[in-house]
Amino acid sequence: MIRNRILVAFAAGMTLLAGCATAAPVPAQTAPASVPPASDAPATSAAAPAGSDIDDFMAKVVAAQKGVKTYTLDMSMETVMAGQPAKIVMKGVVDQSDPANINMSMDMDFAGMQMKTLKVDGAMYLKMAATGKQWMKVPKDQMAQYESATDSADLTAGMEKAKGAMKKIDLVGDETLDGVAVHHYRITVDAAGLSEMTGSDAKISGDTFDYDVWLDDANLMRKVSMDVKADADGEDLPMTVNGVMGHFNEPVSIKAPDPKDVVEMGG
């Protein structure tokens, strides 16, 4: 369904703008052992980026992201499908200790349809709820169509791509998020630039929209939020996106499926 593909591409693009460029738009369920326990410890203190200067903001955020080896992502998107409210939920963990070999485990609930994905040691595996324990291994020449709208799953690359769509950054104020001191910023984003960046055919209403970002004292992304009106195939496509990132540099375990549970995906 074209509309579904637009939503998935847009959701993947939102993780890119958050600085968390996930490796696939069809994410996989994270095993309980894969996601580290919650941590409310505040990040190492550092000067917050200047809200009015995009270059300064980006330089400090990108520098902070370079030190991230592992992180978790919990994102939701509320929209309307066939005239009915629908919700997409993405949960997962990423290990980019080796930038050339990024591993990830994610799950996605697409309005009640559950899908899972793993990317381990350069291989990608998909599983649908109807297939039980069986995983499908994606052929190398088909992996690109399952990967997200980004060119890599590198945090820094995602932030650099997002920079081109940013028009203005304002500091909203200082807050507390899950016990962590954060700085709330509002980014004015160019709508056309974001559509190109995400690879989605959805068109944002208006020339720009606001994207809210919460950074901790170490300039790491802790939360993102946006509420936009869009159009897809001539139909209204409202989207409310909220995401939380955390558990930075905590131990993770991402493993490939048991070979006996894997089949090759057909062309």
Image (cartoon, rainbow, N blue to C red):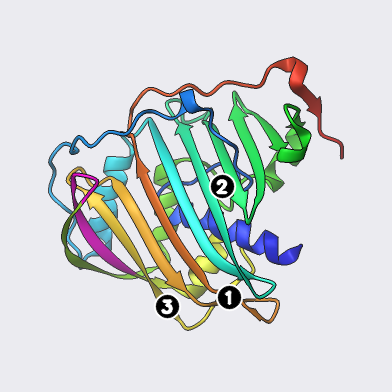
Disc 2 on helix, strand or loop?
A: loop
Q: Label 2 neighbourhood size at 10 Å, few (<14), some (14-19), many (20+)? A: few
Q: Residue at the location (32% across, 34% down)?
A: 38
| Residue 124 falls within the magenta-colored stretch | no
Q: Label 1 neighbourhood size at 10 Å, few (<14), some (14-19), many (20+)? A: many
**Which amino acid does the dot numbered 1 rest on?**
Lys
Contact flag, marks 2 and 1 (Cβ < 8 Å): no
User: How far apart in space, not on screen, are marks 2 and 3 (Cα)?
Assistant: 24 Å
Indicate left or right for 53 with 191 as reference.
Answer: left
Report if residue 37 is visible in the image. Answer: yes
Q: Which residue is mark 3?
A: 208
Q: Which residue is mark 2?
A: 151
Give percent across and percent down for residue 157. Answer: 44, 47
How many numbered discs, if any? 3
- In front of the other: label 2 or label 1? 1
Q: Which residue is mark 1?
A: 203
Q: Label 3 neighbourhood size at 10 Å, few (<14), some (14-19), many (20+)? A: some
**Which amino acid does the dot numbered 2 rest on?**
Asp
**Which amino acid does the dot numbered 3 rest on?**
Thr
Q: Residue at the location (50% across, 42% down)?
A: 91
Q: Assign the magenta stretch its main secondary structure.
A: strand
The boundaries of the magenta stretch are: 177-187
Give percent across and percent down for residue 9. Answer: 61, 57
Indicate left or right for 139 with 6 as reference.
Answer: right
Query: In this rendering, is residue 215 above or below 118?
Result: below
* Mark nearer the N terminus (2 vs 3): 2
